[in-house]
């Protein structure tokens, strides 16, 4: 049994402590370990967007039906997020990470077998198990990065870690496009090669298990988790804290927007750019993911130098305009608008996460689980977006992310008032 050693973050250590310093200790190595997890689930998610278009070709299914790739994946997050939070509270951050990596390994190796079975149900089952493991990792790693240094720089650290997530998306998309799609205009209708990336994932996860098991991962907590009333933080229950509850809604809608855009980028590009193959559309999306990673790198500086809620609101407004551009124009204008949205989506997940858990004290781990559960927005909205695209064309489907970005802009613009009211 793994017994966590819980440590309070010392007070009065923020000044000149550096980005990873707490009470004279530096947690950069621990932060680097967390970054490897962000890279892992980014890679797995990048592969996912290739599968959406590939199964339309190989299994002859509609965009609505292919949306269930995301449905199975994000339902794994929804189902496992609360149990992951319990594991983290019972066995500490390290215990939760080891549990999550074990599940992820099982899912990855099952997907190797699913490629031999060749049925849609077998692939969906494997994606569900893999995502359940990743949900454990994400439930733990996101809030953990915010406590590996001074509280006021928590949003900066989580954005830095999410940059590694962006790099994972790029590599997953590139490798997936190369392995899964045909090198020319022909359509690949075989699932025989799908085992290759998931065998690599399974091996990589096994290596991470051997790294994490002997490593020291301190169970740090923010000081207010121990005595919230002594720190002047609110003692309201979670459901009464509107900066948190509306944050869950904002995260639900963000993941819905992100997943829809990522999932149907290839479809949109192939329809709107003449003579573009699926593989080359995949490479184009990898370039968009490079903008996503760059956005997170730049975003780390932006949220460090400005107020995170303001940056969130501005980025959401810009992305609303990008969706208007995508819907109104075809050709390169629409594709470039869609690619630009990757850059401006980049800071949204980690910033919403950091803003939502601010000041929650002893409820932080439960709140983190609920925020990870909110990624079920990707499971619900992607088939809906596919249905709209099947009925009214691919451009019309982007009305879903447009509406999502409008709410996120509202949340960012009103966060200060929400948080101030919750503190009373």
Image (cartoon, rainbow, N blue to C red):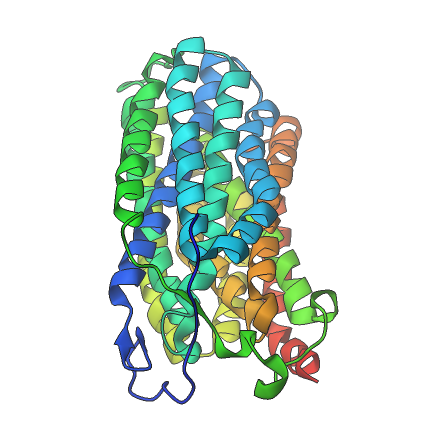
| 63 vs 214: above or below | above
Count numbered badges in the picture.
0
Where residue 3 sits in the image (x, y, percent)? Answer: 44, 56
Q: Would you place residue 392 above or below residue 358 in this image?
A: above
Q: Does 417 sit above or below residue 41? A: below
Residue 112 x, y percent position in the rendering: 37, 20
- Residue at image location 28% in from the left, 29% down from the top: 200
Question: Residue 98 sits in which quadrant?
Answer: top left
Q: Position of residue 336 (x, y in %)?
A: 39, 47
275 sits to left or right of 96: left
* Nearer the observer, 31 or 412: 31
The residue depicted at 38 percent of the width and 44 percent of the height is: 42
Q: Residue 78 location, x and y as percent?
A: 60, 43
Q: Is residue 365 above or below residue 304?
A: above
Q: Is residue 29 left or right of residue 72?
A: left
Going 48% across and 46% down the picture, which residue do you hit? Answer: 136
Classify residue 396 by image quadrant: top right
Depth check: give the residue in front, 13 or 214: 214
Q: Nearer the viewer, residue 294 or 102?
A: 102
Which residue is situated farthest in the right direction here?
240
Q: Could you tell me which quadrant the C terminus lies in? A: bottom right
Q: Is residue 187 visible?
A: yes
Nearer to me, 81 or 422: 81
Is residue 398 visible from the viewing direction of this image?
Answer: no
């Amino acid at each position: 049994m793994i017994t966590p050693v819980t440590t309070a973050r010392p007070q009065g250590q923020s000044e000149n402590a550096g980005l990873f310093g707490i009470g004279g200790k530096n947690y950069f190595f621990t932060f680097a370990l967390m970054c490897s997890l962000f890279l892992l689930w980014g890679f797995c998610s990048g592969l996912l967007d290739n599968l959406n278009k590939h199964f339309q070709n190989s299994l002859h299914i509609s965009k609505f039906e292919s949306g269930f790739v995301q449905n199975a994946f994000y339902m794994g997050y929804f189902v496992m997020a609360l149990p992951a939070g319990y594991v983290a509270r019972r066995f500490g951050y390290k215990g939760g990470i080891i549990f999550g990596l074990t599940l992820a390994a099982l899912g990855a190796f099952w997907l190797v077998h699913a490629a031999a079975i060749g049925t849609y149900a077998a692939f969906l089952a494997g994606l569900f198990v893999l995502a359940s493991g990743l949900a454990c990792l994400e439930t733990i790693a996101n809030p953990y990065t915010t406590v590996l240094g001074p509280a006021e720089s928590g949003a900066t650290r989580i954005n830095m870690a999410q940059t590694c997530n962006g790099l994972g998306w790029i590599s997953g998309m590139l490798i997936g496009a190369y392995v899964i799609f045909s090198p020319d205009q022909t359509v690949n209708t075989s699932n025989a090669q799908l085992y290759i990336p998931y065998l690599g994932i399974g091996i990589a996860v096994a290596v991470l298990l051997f790294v994490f098991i002997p490593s020291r991962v301190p169970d740090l907590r923010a000081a207010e988790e121990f005595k919230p009333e002594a720190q002047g933080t609110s003692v309201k229950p979670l459901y009464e804290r509107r900066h948190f509850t509306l944050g869950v809604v904002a995260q639900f809608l963000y993941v819905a927007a992100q997943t829809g855009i990522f999932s149907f980028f290839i479809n949109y590009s192939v329809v709107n750019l003449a003579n573009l193959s699926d593989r080359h559309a995949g490479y184009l999306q990898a370039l968009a993911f490079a903008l996503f990673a760059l956005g997170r790198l730049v975003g780390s500086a932006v949220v460090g130098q400005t107020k995170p809620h303001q940056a969130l609101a501005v980025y959401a407004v810009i992305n609303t305009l990008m969706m208007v551009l995508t819907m109104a124009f075809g050709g390169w204008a629409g594709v470039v608008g869609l690619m630009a949205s990757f850059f401006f989506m980049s800071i949204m997940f980690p910033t919403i996460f950091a803003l939502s858990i601010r000041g929650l004290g002893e409820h932080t781990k439960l709140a983190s689980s609920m925020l990870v559960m909110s990624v079920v927005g990707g499971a619900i909205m992607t088939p809906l977006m596919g249905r709209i695209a099947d009925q009214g064309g691919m451009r019309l489907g982007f009305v879903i992310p447009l509406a999502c970005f409008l709410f996120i802009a509202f949340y960012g613009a009103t966060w200060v008032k929400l948080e101030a009211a919750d503190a009373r």
